Image: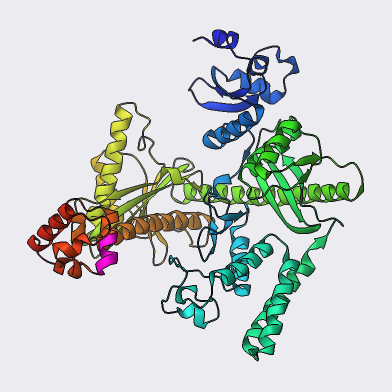
Amino acid sequence: MSLEHKLATLPTRPGVYLMKNEAGEIIYVGKAKNLRNRVRSYFQSSRDHSPKVRVMVSHISDFEYIVTDSEVEALILENNLIKEHSPWYNVRLKDDKTYPYIKVTLYEDFPRVLLVRRRLNDGARYFGPYTDSKAVRETLAFLRAIFPIRTCRKEIRPGASDRPCLNYHLGRCLAPCAGLISVEDYRAMIGEAIAFLEGKVDHVLPSLTKKMQEAAEKLEFEKAARLRDQIRAIEKIAEQQKIVAAHSEDQDFLGYARIADLACVQVFFVREGKLVGREHFLLDCSPEEDEAEILKAFIEQFYAEAAFVPKSIFLPLEVGEQDVLESWLSELRGSRVRMHVPKRGTKKQLVDMVMENARTVLQVVRSRAERQEADINEALRQLEEVLELDGLPERIEAYDISHTQGSETVASMVVMLNGRLAGDEYRRFRIRSVQDEPNDYLSMQEVIRRRFTRGLKEQEEGEDGKFARFPDLVVIDGGKGQLNAAIAVRDELGLDIPFIGLAERLEEVFVEGQSDPVNLPRNTKGSLLLQRIRDEAHRFALTYHRNLRGKASRRSILDDVPGIGPKRKKALLRHFGTVKAIRQASVDELCQVEGINRKVAEEIYQYMHGAEGEA
């Protein structure tokens, strides 16, 4: 169907539209109250279009649309599609998939408090998202120092009677596994921890003070002293919370700053009139992007993932479709949410302060990024000069071998593009030619042969596959022996790619045809870049090897029994304890296990008594 025909048949319903370029890639996702009017407007006179829209329209060759029942549904769908496709012309939160949350597992009888990367609809209570993982871990450590919340992964039921672990004896857990605290008392403590995470530290102090006094009256002085220390720690935090309002309303204050294609939005969190925290978020945007659009895009993407939506949100300027945003936010909160642009008074002063903070953060981020860019360029230029390359090594590949005395031998291929690690380009290999004996030379030759043979085939067939693009430089983890082994395969395949070896002990760099290492001091930027990609190749290979080794060590004779999957295997081991006990069990005893019928029990019995050796 032609573009003109699609434009002529657009519905007048609300919905979402996806603009595509000639390659079929989605370059922009938008929503509309009236799809016909909105989408057609892009292809009318460009005099009223912003520079960003004019450039985007020049790349549109097709579009799709999805009809929704309401503008709010369109907003939700638009946000999900932006997250899925990361279109070039949309404002997007940077690294939004990695933001951490604090999770309280309220669905458990004895909840835990964890750091997680995804917010699920699982009955838990979430806090976040946060942008600083280190700060979140410090918060969790402080929280666990104040409240002896369990950290184990045990499934604990009321009335459990296990032996308490070391954490109990160190005063870091109340041993619900041993039945030393009731569900009610444990959950009361979790309630105090939640109040603390909400920033309501004053709510926690009366309860702890009462417990301290009761412990002192019972002459439990060690417990009273521990509670006293907890109270002092919380009081110190309470002193740091700035009172910004006389009322008890929950509010968020937003400010922004933008330099070229990078924007920063700062959020101040006010709870019950106190400033309890702040976070900043970076967004990718077009240099010509409208500032109101940046703020609107942030509101849509941030609050879609936020664990809490306040009653009031204060902004530095008006954003479009405010009524739709308020309706959507109200649905998320479960009660009315208002967005305001204060013109005077303390709220305006606080918004101005948030704006100033956003500008400061963005300047720091940009200067840090510029320094990193300069360091990378210097490192690449240094490698070009010292290694006598034909140009800057834009693509570097590093290879490493990992095994345990020759068993489960694997190899890794790690890629660096323009000085930055590119995780989606990594590849791993399970070595086939070497079995149960350590031979790094043959293993390295196999991985080099497989990687470049596959690449040559893809190039010959015109495929844009995983191995079609060849590197400007190959780094072999090891000295002259490993390097020469890899070069032999390279020459066998007729490739003209520079290979170097990086020996770990002295960080010496070896090149083809030279017995002595090249003059690249270990603390120069070029050497540090090589060390970084070599270390990453080592980490990636070691992780894969450990994974395979762990699977091998967990394997038992039960894995070979017909009809026995992971669930039945787990049930058998839970019931009998060991494979030896399962082998000694009768058919009737096997039938007593949950999920095991008589036919399966007979198969297990026959197999176990017909198989030799133990797991």
Closest to the observer, 109 or 113: 109
Q: How many marks?
A: 0
Give yes or no for residue 536 being in the magenta stretch. no
Closest to the observer, 131 or 167: 167
Residue at horizontal 83 percent and vertical 40 percent from the top = 341
Report the span colored magenta: 571-577
- Res. 585 visible in picture: yes
Residue 90, position in %: x, y? 62, 32
- View extreme (left): residue: 610
Residue 441, position in %: x, y? 24, 56
Closest to the observer, 114 or 363: 114
Residue 454's image quarter? top left
Residue 505, position in %: x, y? 39, 67
Residue 613's image quarter? bottom left
Label the magenta part by its dominant secondary structure: helix
- View extreme (right): residue: 345
Q: Is residue 255 above or below residue 11?
A: below
Residue 49's image quarter? top right
- Res. 549 visible in picture: no
Residue at horizontal 60 percent and vertical 14 percent from the top = 11
- Looking at the image, residue 177 sits to the left or right of residue 253; the answer is left
Quadrant of the image containing the C terminus: bottom left
Residue 303, position in %: x, y? 66, 43
